[in-house]
Image: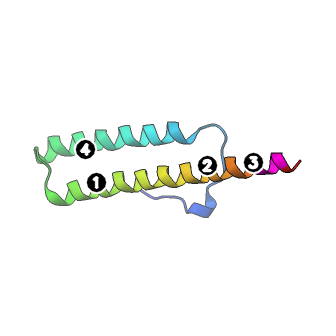
Amino acid sequence: MKFKKYQDIMPSNRTNFTMVYNYAARTLTQIETILKQAYGNPLPDRPKRRLERMRHKMEQMVARYKQCEADLKKEYIEKKKRI
């Protein structure tokens, strides 16, 4: 699997962040299910830790996105008041 570089990804208005997050969360859950079928339940430590790290990073992305959204909204309101 090869990922594009961050700077090579162009902005898109066809999706919203909530939709992307929910799809990624569902996919991560499906991967967990497949790994449990392959390795047994509970998962071995290494795959379990990697899934947890991925979940944590997704939560950090959401938190950062919400912070940026709030900052932009605040900036927009302040700009509107000045006019």
- Give the residue pinned by disc 2: 70
Residue 60 coordinates in the image, percent (x, y): 44, 55
Q: Residues within 10 Å of mark 3 (few under 14, many from 20)?
A: few
| Residue pointed to by mark 1 | 52
Residue labelled with disc 4: 32
Magenta: main secondary structure equals helix
The reply to whether the C-beta atoms of the residues labelled 2 and 3 are less than 8 Å apart is no
* Kind of element beneath mark 4: helix
Mark nearer the N terminus (1 vs 4):
4
Say which of 65 and 19 sits in front: 65
Report, in whole angstroms, how far the alpha carbon at label 1 lies from the one at label 4.
10 Å
Compared to 19, does 4 lie above or below?
A: below
Asked if disc 1 and disc 3 are in contact, CB closer than 8 Å, the reply is no
Quadrant into which the N terminus falls: bottom left
Crowd band around label 1 with a 10 angstrom C-alpha radius: few (<14), some (14–19), many (20+): few
- Circle nearer the N terminus (1, 3): 1
Asked if the residue at tag 2 contacts the one at tag 4, i.e. Cβ–Cβ closer than 8 Å, the answer is: no
| Residue 76's disc number | 3
Identify the residue shown where x is 62% and y is 60%. 8
SS class, disc 3: helix
Would residue 8 appear left or right of 79 to someone viewing this image?
Answer: left
- Left or right: residue 48 versus residue 21 is left
Q: Earlier in the sequence, mark 3 or mark 4?
A: 4
